[in-house]
Image (cartoon, helix red, strand yellow):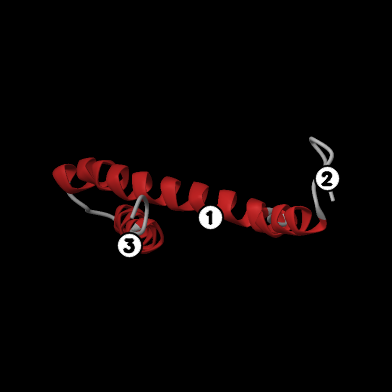
Amino acid sequence: MSQIPGKKTATQHSKTADKRRPLSCVLYTFVRSAVQTASFWGAVVLPFLSLPLLLTGIDSHSGLLAFLVLLVTNVVALLVGHTHRK
């Protein structure tokens, strides 16, 4: 039985369909990669934001709160972004 050029057989068509991923899977992969990238670079930049607080001294409750928020945010960013480009 001859095959028409450009026409896929049932086997070839099912192999092509298997390679396609659902849109939700593609979106999940894209969002996950974007969040990991942002977290990685956030973990790199955040220590520089706390540097002025440390150099001028933490002498008030609001300064301490700001430092602790930056510290916790940095730890979360490290945990989320640690697999970036692995």
Q: Amino acid at mark 3?
A: Val
Q: Is residue 11 left or right of residue 81?
A: right
- Is disc 2 surrounded by few (<14), some (14 to 19) or many (20+) residues within 10 Å? few
| CA separation in Å, label 2 and label 1 | 46 Å
Residue nearest the viewer, comparing 11 with 28? 11
Q: Residue furthest top?
A: 5
Q: Which mark is residue 71?
A: none
Q: Which residue is mark 2?
A: 2
Badge 2 marks a residue whose secondary structure is loop
Looking at the image, residue 76 sits to the left or right of residue 30; the answer is: left
Mark 3 or 2: the one toward you: 2
Q: Disc 2 or 1, which lies upstream in sequence?
A: 2
Kindly identify the amino acid type of the residue bearing the numbered disc 1. Arg
- Between disc 1 and disc 3, the foreground one is 1
Q: Specify which label sits upstream in the sequence, 3 or 2.
A: 2
Say whether disc 1 or disc 3 marks the residue closer to the N-terminus: 1
Q: Which residue is mark 1?
A: 32
The residue nearer to you, when weighing 5 against 50, is 5
Q: Secondary structure at mark 1?
A: helix
Residue matched to label 3:
75
Measured Cα–Cα span from mark 3 to mark 2: 63 Å
For the point 80% across and 35% down, the residue is 5
Give the quarter of the figure containing the C terminus: bottom left
- Seen in the image, is 22 located left or right of residue 47? right
| Figure quadrant of residue 4 | top right
User: At 30% from the left edge and 55% from the top edge, which residue is drawn?
Assistant: 67
Could you say where residue 52 lies in the image, as x and y percent from the top left? 22, 40
